[in-house]
Image (cartoon, rainbow, N blue to C red):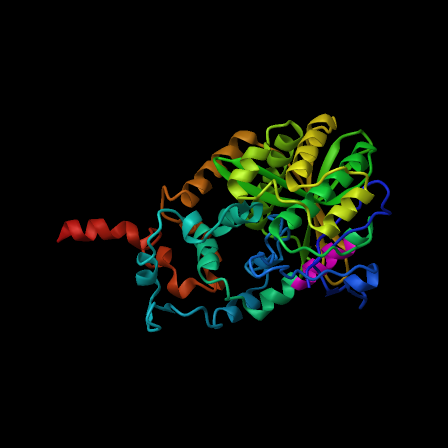
Amino acid sequence: MQTWSFRAPFSFPNLVISAFCLSLPGGRSTKSQDLCPIQSCAMAETEEEEVVSAEASGFSDLSDSEFLEVLDLEDTQESNASLSKPGPSSELPGKDGKLISLEKWKRGLDVSSPMERFHLKYLYVTDLSTQNWCEQQMVYEKELPDFLVPEKAAVLDTGACIHLARELEVHDLVTIPITTKEDAWAVKFLNILSMIPTLQSEGRIREFPVFGEVEGVLLVGVIDELHYTAKGELELVELKTRRRPVLPLEAQKKKDCFQVSLYKHIFDAMVQGKVTTDSLIHHTKLRPEKPLGPSVLRHAQQGGFSVKSLGDLMELVFLSLTLSDLPVIDILKIEYIHQETSTVLGTEIVAFEEKEVRGKVQHYMAYWMGHREPQGVDMEEAWKCRTCNYADICEWRKGGGVHSSMLEPQAKKAK
């Protein structure tokens, strides 16, 4: 079953489609059928039709910091205990089924850039913010996607529940059947159209999709919350939940600050008319001429939108964004909340430094474009390796802070 977050426009009483079926705080279980009469099952209409994956819409984004919280080392005993947990194998199956080393497996990949190697059309904001923590670790997570320790999975589930509960405070959920990636993106576009007038009327919106081309790569994400302050300033709030009732270390805050700065960078470009349909189609390979599915079309018409294809809807979205008079984001705030008690542990006001953000983005994108090797942490942040599940196979560590492939030419030359 597949459902998508849909903030119903205008005539709808704040309806949403969500892919979650989770336990909410307080023991309440929420399923799509509990919230509205419509259910969704992403099944192909024909054998040639593409079945939409969970990421097909391009807006799935890990917008929380729970995944890295176990690396904070706030509890020495927990950190030391985690060192004994087995990491991923340093051997992977080759073409003949026999195990080969990770290094040999990577050398056998005949591609020119990580974007091609991982078959990516776009990146998530969290991909770049994870690079801010440890780029080499992020690469291993891409290379070994099936490896996720139970503790981290549980932390992520809890964070997702809290985010969902927050989302339900401002709208209900509804489900729409989809069969193509065009339908999935169409639902997200409908969400944007429904949230623009709410934000214009100084209302509060949550889970706002953002996307834009940055350094030649499409970057997408989801803003937790946007609202206006008493002074009329547009404020972005990023929710971060914590397993323990303590604030994160500075290294974690640094990663979170970079994440919200990227959200502002992309959102500002959207409302300033700098994001184009041509760029989006080029990166996602969407088919704008494809007619909307019957369920998506019906909801669009009920909302007062006279559209027939994805292209019609895209033009309406970009026109609405540029004509909406929405301002750029004035304030960036991170709110840290204890998972168990929902207590606010503290807030962080982020100073947006455009030059610094652009510099980091250029550096991180250079890896994705294949212009440099991935890098691990600097020596002063080697403590992050203590709880990294990839420490045993990390080429950066084995090279003493230099990627092993960088040493090969020097070794050959020495011979």
- Choose top left, top right, bottom left or bottom right for residue 209: top right
- Choose top left, top right, bottom left or bottom right for residue 234: top right
**Which residue ends up furthest to the left in the rendered image?**
415
- Please name the predominant secondary structure of the magenta segment in the image: helix
- Quadrant in the picture for the N terminus: bottom right
Q: Which residues are magenta?
A: 157-166
Residue drawn at 59 percent across, 68 percent down: 151
Residue drawn at 73 percent across, 29 percent down: 326
Pick the front one: 41 or 195: 41
Measured as percent of width and height from the top left, residue 249 is found at: 58, 51
Residue drawn at 50 percent across, 66 percent down: 147
Q: Is residue 284 left or right of residue 363?
A: right
Residue drawn at 46 percent across, 56 percent down: 137
Task: Confirm whether residue 215 shows in the render.
Answer: yes
Task: Confirm whether residue 383 shows in the render.
Answer: no
Membership of 164 in magenta stretch: yes
Pick the front one: 176 or 144: 176
Measured as percent of width and height from the top left, residue 113 is found at: 38, 47
Pick the front one: 172 or 276: 276
Pick the front one: 93 or 149: 93
Measured as percent of width and height from the top left, residue 7 is found at: 77, 46
Measured as percent of width and height from the top left, residue 240 is found at: 67, 52
Membership of 79 in magenta stretch: no
Q: Is residue 175 left or right of residue 123?
A: right
**How many numbered callouts?**
0
Name above or below for residue 194 compared with residue 379: above
